[in-house]
Every structure is written in structure tokens, then in C-alpha cells.
Amino acid sequence: MMMSDKKWVIYGANGYTGRLVVDEAIKRGLKPILAGRSESVKTLADEKGLEAQVFDLSSVDVITDNLSGISVLANCAGPFSRTAAPMMQACIHTQTHYVDITGEISVYEAGHGMDSEARSAGIVICPGVGFDVIPTDCLAVHLKDKMPDATHLSLGFAMKGSKASKGTAKTGVEGMAHGGRIRKNGELKQVPLAFKERTIDYGYGETHAITIPWGDVFTAYHSTGIPNIEVYYPRSPKGAAALRKRQKYMKLMKIDWIKRFVQNRIDKIWKPNTAEQRAAATSYVWGEVKNANGKMIRARFTTVDGYDLTASGTVEVSQYLMRDHGQSGYYTPSKLMGKELVEKMPGFSGIEYL
């Protein structure tokens, strides 16, 4: 079957990021099927001259019925802790490749857990084809190749001129309840929020940063085999102390009605980034490897706003999966398409080694 004959679905197409993915696909001359839970996805599809599907994710059977004959599913509907697993299962039934834009560790774990089923079905499961985690994942492999005996990997990113989307903020509310995560001696380890602090020069001067439970704690281990991994994000020492102080209250986010209350509040007050804000934004990506002798290599680069990169990454990987590639099973983006994938991302500055 030629790529042009293959069908792919963007689920959550009418969300903030989903719409950016749709526009990127159209820009490349592609005709995805737009899908979602609400009828508004039909309006969007009519406007863009595309096909639409409306279905919810209430059961694997419902999803399976709607994915019959589909080659690739790009899931843009969070929180992915709820949407990803049933979609992956349905994709195994229908022999549909699965990608999404999550940064949630639990989703990577679920995808990895379905590796053998995905192999048997002849499909690829590759969560995290957006800003989470293409740039950091590819940088991790570049650094590992520079230092094959690395025992420790630190990654970090920072944003200038952009803020999280409503969906990311709501997902963050869920994540905060579970504290921090690092990888130590090959094992995922639960740690407090802001477990470690350090200064990092992302490329605009020394900045205070804290550890966060980012997806690379899971994915970079599978991409590089490095047993000790931490991910950092800018936060002032005062902000870090406040976060640690609030930690006991964060656990309340596990209680459904409290979580819903906070997420509904986000719904009411959130204002999305405009196209102008995104165009003026810069994303900074940084990494460091160390070996047992204490030798160290650092690297960094810049790229575009995280949401624009997510749109580009989702379409890039979906296009790749619609071609003949002969791969199946669970993949990280760099394992699927090589560390050079980052070079295809918009605004990539090239890697500067320090």
C-alpha cells in the first residue's frame, strides 16, 4: 500500500495542540482524519476539508471499531494517563501504529509493557513524539555516543516567551500528586519534589534549576542504557523551598473531587498562547554526561516554541510510520528514527558541546 493510500487519525484534533498538529499536516499536503470526543471536531474537519470521526474512549471495543483500516493513530487527547492505555490496546487489535505527545512516565511504562504484543501485531508504539521527548531524547543519545562509558546523565530544558497549554497544566496537576522521579542504578525511584537543585547555563546565563519527574527519566534509559538519570527545570531557590513545603498538600490531588476542582479552575482562567507569542518564543535544551572517572561532557541547543515543535514532531513521526519501515514494538523517538530526528525539528540551532 502506498503512503498516500494509508489513513491516519489525529485524535483530540480540536484541542489546543491537536489543532496545531492538524495545521502542520495540511501544510505538508497530508489529509488526516480528525477525531475526538465532541461534535466540534466535525466543524473543524468541515472547515479544513477533511474527514471526521466522533467517538469516546469508554471502552477498547469502541476504539477498536473506529480504528479499523487505520495505519497510524496520533493521540493528542490528555490526560494521557487515562487515554493512552485503551488506545494502545485498540491499536494492537487493529494493527495500527500508535504515537502520542505525552510526557507522563506512567504512559511510557504502559507502552513498554505492551512491547511483545506490539511486536506480534507488527505495530510501533512510540509515545512522546512532541517536545516531550524528542529534543531531550535525541540529545541524550548524542551525548552517550560522545561518552560510551557514561554512568550519569542529566537533562534539562527551559522556555522563554511561552507557557504550558491548558491540557499540560491539567496533566501537571495529576503528576504533582505523585512527587518526583529519578533513575538510580537503572531503577526508577520516587523522590520528593525539587529533590535536587543546581545551577545550569541553558544558553542565557546561569539559572537555578530543580529536578522534575519528566518523561526522560524513563525514556532516556531505554535510548542510552545510562543507569542514573535526572531532569532539571528552572526554579528559584525560594520557589524550590515553597514547592517542598507544599508537597504534603500536593498529595490531596489524588482525591478526585479536589483534582477536578483545580482542573476546572484551570479551564476557567487559562488563556492559550497566541501564534505571535509562539513565534517569539525559544526553547533551550541542555544535557550533561559523566563517567566513573568524573570526566564530563555538556551540550546544549535551542529550538522553537514547544507547541510548534510538538506539531512538527507528531507529523514527522506519523509520516515515517506511514512508509515501509519494518519496525515493531515499543520505541523511544531516537530509537525509532535515530538521534538525527532532532535535526528535522523547526528552528534547531545545532548542538554546541561545552
Image (cartoon, rainbow, N blue to C red):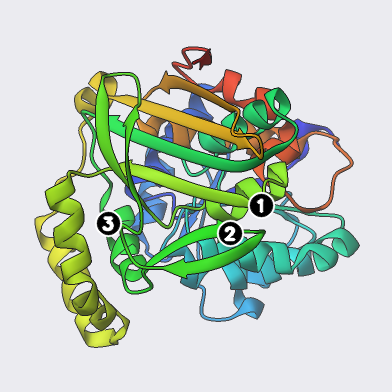
Q: Tell me the kind of residue under disc 1.
A: Pro
Residue 12 location (% of width, % of height): 44, 55
Residue neighbourhood size for the residue with mark 3, other residues' Cα within 10 Å, grouped as few (<14), some (14–19), many (≥20):
some
Residue highlighted by disc 2 = 184
Camera-near label (1 vs 3) is 1
Give the mark, 1 or 3, whose residue is nearer the N terminus. Answer: 3
Give the secondary structure at mark 1. loop
Q: Which mark is residue 17?
A: none
Residue beneath disc 1:
227
57 or 198: which is nearer to us?
A: 198
Under circle 2, the secondary element is: strand
Q: Which residue in the structure is indicated by mark 3?
A: 169
Q: Nearer the viewer, residue 320 or 245?
A: 245
Furthest-front residue in view? 293
Q: Tell me, yes or no, whether the two marked residues, 2 and 1, touch with CB atoms within 8 Å.
A: yes
The residue at 58%/65% (across/down) is 188
Q: Is residue 205 left or right of residue 14?
A: left
Above or below: residue 175 compared with residue 232: below
| Horizontal and vertical percent position of residue 94 | 77, 64
> Does 231 appear above or below 322?
below
- The amino acid beneath tag 3 is Ala
Say whether residue 66 is visible: no
> Is the residue under label 3 in contact with that under label 1 (CB below 8 Å)?
no
Image coords of residue 167 (percent x, y): 32, 56
Picture residue at 75% right of the left edge, 41% below the top: 6
Nearer mark to the viewer, of 2 and 3: 2
Rounded to the nearest angstrom, the CA distance separating label 2 from label 3 is 27 Å
Where 46 sits versus 123, above or below? above
Q: Secondary structure at mark 3?
A: helix
